[in-house]
């Protein structure tokens, strides 16, 4: 058996670059900006250019990229006034309960299709948590980014999936009970959901925040995760925030 192809890939430059990404991924729990650093380092990569070509094969996504629509900033005080059960109301209630800043993301100056895609994916990421049901912690993060990966090929999120698997492969089960098998299941759940769903990238959420969350899910063919460790619905604080009965464990 020939391993020549490994020699061609495992150049010193590629190995050093991989180690840099591993270091960023390993520190993401302590420094969330590391996630943005990973995407920024891939901005001018071949993988990002392939992502753009792939995304533009979908007419609605191609139109969104050409328009470079970003919409208004997310204002939790205004969104919480939306009808109960709407996408905007649910997003605001959950974000407030978590104490999250809706403007957590790092925006780039939009001078190219690449920068627009990066900005739009960052801005809408937490909305995807609400829509898909994937939790906002280590139990759900790889699930929700896998929805984006399978629909867009976005290399920043794809590499995070790969690096997470690699880190858990070497480290084993952590204090939360997460191991490489858990992450495989999580990524698989996100991939399956993303394949079933209509493209999320071109949706102008800002113009439909008042619509019921369930209406959005039905239209986009999203079958959300609503129970188990993967789901934000399993968090009693978040269930209470959106007016659902809080189940008390036996």
Image (spheres, grey):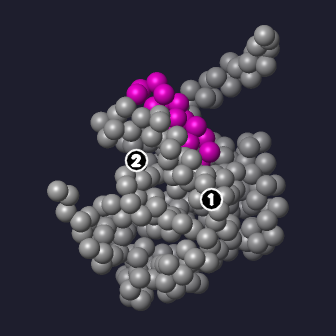
Question: Is 123 above or below relative to 147?
Answer: below
Q: What stretch is highlighted in magenta?
A: 157-172
Determine which residue is flagged by label 1. 194
Residue at point 59% right, 59% down? 193
> Which circle's residue, 2 or 1, is located before the other in the chain?
2
Helix, strand or loop at mark 2:
loop
Relative depth, front residue between 174 and 155 = 174
Using the image as rendered, state which of residue 193 and residue 242 is in the foreground. Answer: 193
| Location of residue 242 in the rendering, given as x and y in whole percent from the top left corner | 33, 76
Residue 36 shown left or right of residue 28 in the figure = right
Query: What residue do we see at 30% from left, 75% from top?
Result: 244
> Residue under circle 2?
138
Q: Dot 1: few (<14), some (14–19), or many (≥20) neighbours within 10 Å?
A: many
Residue 149's place in the image compared with 97, above or below, is above
Q: Which of the image's four quarters has the C terminus?
A: bottom left
Q: Which residue lies furthest to the left in this view?
A: 250
> Which mark lies nearer to you, 2 or 1?
1
Whole-Å distance between the Cαs marked 2 and 1? Answer: 19 Å
Dividing the picture into quadrants, the one containing residue 98 is bottom left
């Amino acid at each position: 058996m020939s391993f020549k192809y490994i020699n061609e890939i495992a150049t010193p430059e590629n190995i050093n670059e991989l180690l840099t990404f591993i270091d960023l991924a390993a520190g993401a729990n302590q420094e969330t900006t590391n996630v943005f650093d990973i995407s920024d380092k891939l901005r001018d990569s071949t993988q990002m250019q392939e992502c753009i070509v792939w995304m533009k094969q979908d007419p609605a996504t191609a139109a969104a990229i050409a328009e470079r629509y970003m919409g208004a900033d997310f204002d939790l005080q205004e969104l919480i006034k939306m009808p109960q059960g709407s996408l905007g109301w649910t997003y605001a209630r959950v974000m407030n309960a978590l104490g999250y800043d809706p403007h957590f993301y790092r925006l780039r100056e939009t001078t190219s299709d690449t920068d627009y895609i990066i900005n739009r994916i960052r801005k809408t990421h937490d909305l995807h948590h609400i829509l898909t049901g994937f939790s906002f912690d280590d139990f759900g993060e790889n699930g929700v980014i896998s929805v984006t990966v399978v629909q867009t090929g976005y290399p920043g999120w794809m590499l995070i999936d790969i690096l997470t698997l690699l880190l858990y492969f070497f480290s084993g089960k952590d204090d939360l009970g997460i191991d490489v098998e858990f992450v495989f299941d999580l990524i698989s759940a996100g991939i399956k959901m993303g394949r079933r769903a209509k493209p999320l990238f071109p949706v102008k959420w800002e113009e439909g925040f008042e619509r019921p969350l369930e209406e959005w899910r039905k239209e986009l063919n999203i079958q959300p995760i609503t129970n188990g460790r993967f789901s934000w619905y399993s968090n009693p604080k978040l269930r209470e925030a959106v007016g659902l009965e809080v189940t008390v464990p036996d």
